[in-house]
Amino acid sequence: MKSFLFVLYFSLTLYAGVISPKVSVKTSSPVLDFVVRGGDIWAGTANGEALHITPKGKIISTTVLPVIEDSWGEKIKQKIMSIDLSSDAKTLIVAGEDGCLYTIRGGKVAKTSFSTKTVVKKIAFISEFKVALALLSNEVVFFDLKTNRIMKTLSGGTSPLSDMALSTDKKIAVIAGEAGVVSVIDTAVMKIIRRIEGGNVDNIYKIDIQNNRVLTAGQDRRAILYTLDGKSYSRFEGSFLIYTVALSPSAGVMAAAMDEENLISVFDTIKRQKIAMAKGHTATLNRIAFIDEKRFVSCADENKILFWELP
């Protein structure tokens, strides 16, 4: 691969300021996934709650998935593995721990015909009725909510998948997993059009795409910022496993969990400088997402979700 590599070390960025969360929202259990829309947050928890949270941290609605039976036959609350919101902000699509797909509209939960024996790692709306599901088993499934049927199942390779992200216009999906390779999918034709590699040499935990840039979080302690064509990348070195990352809408700012202290490192991707350290989490980060160029949200394996604002 033709690439132009930049390596960033923490020793070059010792003067980044520490920021504290602007808002902290207490939840009944850890938030595993969330989606940002217009500053509001729709979050899915380990207790099966789908929460609607305002930018000021107020929980304005809570909808709970049906309980499931454990191996002993006892009724238990199921985790929401992934969550997304339709373009009209009226329908939530939720992947349950039971491998089933649910919709939530007007506070009412409906179960679709989709189910899987593997884990749904990520779910996303492609259009009003079309959704994509990235499965741990290495498959991407395209499902039509209107017909309640699978449209197509696409193999993502031979290795388990960890995450999926969609471009703002929903035309491109990127997936990644244990192989350390990014696959680029044209969502209209439901086909892999490109594979990007060279930056990561191990499992990619999380992935994001904004403004024709793709950012990965690696087990190899690398956050890699690729151009979407795969011709160049920048490498950001962490001191520990990098569990999650996020890009601002312009891709000019990135945030990543890069150390054992559960801090979030924030970088200017143009100047390639660390500009802030976000301190507030006390457990392993699950997800980070930007609201705009200055504000982002994060959650971890603890009962809270944090809102941040850069100086």
Image: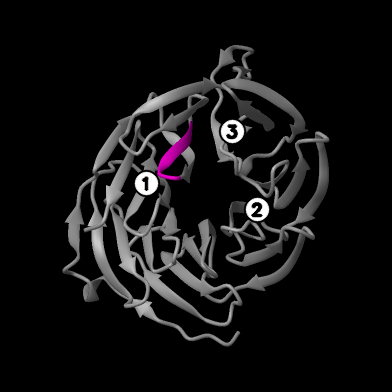
Query: Residue 166's mark?
Result: none
Image quarter (top left, top right, bottom left or bottom right) of the C terminus? bottom left
Whichever of labels 3 and 1 marks the residue nearer the N terminus, that label is 3
Q: CA distance from mark 2 to mark 3?
A: 32 Å
Mark 2 closeness class: few <14, some 14–19, many ≥20 residues within 10 Å: some
Q: Position of residue 193 (x, y in %)?
A: 73, 69
Dividing the picture into quadrants, the one containing residue 2 is bottom right
Magenta residues?
38-44
What amino acid is found at the position of numbered circle 1 in the picture? Val
In the picture of the structure, the residue carrying the numbered disc 2 is 160
Dividing the picture into quadrants, the one containing residue 55 is top left
Specify whether residue 119 is painted magenta: no
What amino acid is found at the position of numbered circle 2 in the picture? Pro
Q: Nearer the viewer, mark 2 or mark 3?
A: 3
Up/down of 186 relative to 243, above or below: below
What amino acid is found at the position of numbered circle 3 in the picture? Lys
Dividing the picture into quadrants, the one containing residue 84 is top right
For numbered disc 2, what is the local secondary structure?
loop
Q: Position of residue 119 (x, y in %)?
A: 64, 39
- Magenta stretch, main secondary structure, is strand
Whichever of labels 1 and 2 marks the residue nearer the N terminus, that label is 2
Up/down of 9 relative to 64, above or below: below
Q: Nearer the viewer, mark 1 or mark 2?
A: 1
Up/down of 264 relative to 285, above or below: below
Going by the image, does 118 lie left or right of 225? Answer: right
| Residue 136 appears in the rendering | no
Q: Position of residue 158 (x, y in %)?
A: 72, 59
Up/down of 76 relative to 258, above or below: above
Q: Residue at x 41, y 60 (%)?
A: 248
For numbered disc 3, what is the local secondary structure?
loop
Q: Residue at x 59, y 77 (%)?
A: 230
Query: Residue 297's mark?
Result: 1
